[in-house]
Amino acid sequence: MALGTTEVESPPREPGRPVDRRWLLAAGLVVVLVVGGVLAWDWRHLDQRYESGYGIKPRVGVGEPVWTTLVHHNRDDLEEVTVTEIEPIVRTDGAEVEVEYLICELDQGNLAREKVGGFGYGLGDRDVDRYCATTTPAKGATFDPTGDSLQELLVGVTATRPGRTIITGHHIEFENGWRVGDDDIAVEIDLAVRRSR
């Protein structure tokens, strides 16, 4: 050491630099918020799939409705929901159709007498009266296809002019309390319409 100079010693340094605790707290908070958001989104969204898949090709006159089942009753894999929106997925609409959706409360007596298990496919207005004890417009209604329920979701299609209309499916949106969901029901209706007789 030279005379007249003072040497200042630095404090001992710890190996590695200490991490600022505020950064750890912020990172932890971000992780909690992301995980919480994912769980809330998953809880809020109903994963309910109606999984119907068939098609009908009715040949009718102008003004003759055709009714078919979209969702059958007695489905233990589904929950009771309120239908908030339902509409057809239309490929072509040459017959300018009117589409109606109903919740059908099946008539047990008539089903038993005729030895059928549900509403059916490609039927007319008289069949709605015969197989449904009551009907309710689907939009805004509670639909319960579960367990011992006798509710089915029906669609009715009525042409306003001759032509051909192809409906490839039906988009449904629903809720159960705070939970919401949607699905496309793959029931195709290929409607050929002749002039009324």
Image: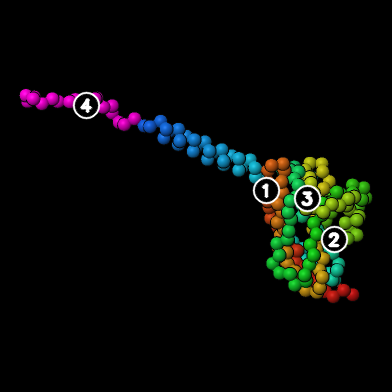
Q: Which of disc 2 and disc 1 is earlier in sequence?
A: 2
Given the image, on which type of amino acid does mark 1 rest?
Answer: Gly
Pair 1/2: label in front: 1
Q: CA distance from mark 1 to mark 3?
A: 14 Å
Given the image, on which type of amino acid does mark 2 rest?
Answer: Leu
Given the image, on which type of amino acid does mark 4 rest?
Answer: Ser
Marks 1 and 3 close (CB-CB < 8 Å): no
Q: CA distance from mark 1 to mark 4?
A: 64 Å
Q: On residue 120, which mark appears?
A: none
Check disc 4 and report the residue beneath it. 10
Q: Is residue 133 magenta?
A: no
Q: Residue furthest left?
A: 3
Please give the name of the residue rendered at 82% of the width and 48% of the height, measured from the top-left corner. 151
Label 3 secondary element: loop
Check disc 2 and report the residue beneath it. 123
Instruction: Work out whether residue 130 or residue 19 is closer to the camera in this orientation and state it.
Output: 19
Given the image, on which type of amino acid does mark 3 rest?
Answer: Gly
Please provide the residue range marked out in magenta.
1-18
Quarter of the image with the C terminus in it: bottom right
Check disc 1 and report the residue beneath it. 181
Q: Which of disc 2 and disc 4 is earlier in sequence?
A: 4
Residue 122 at least partly seen: no
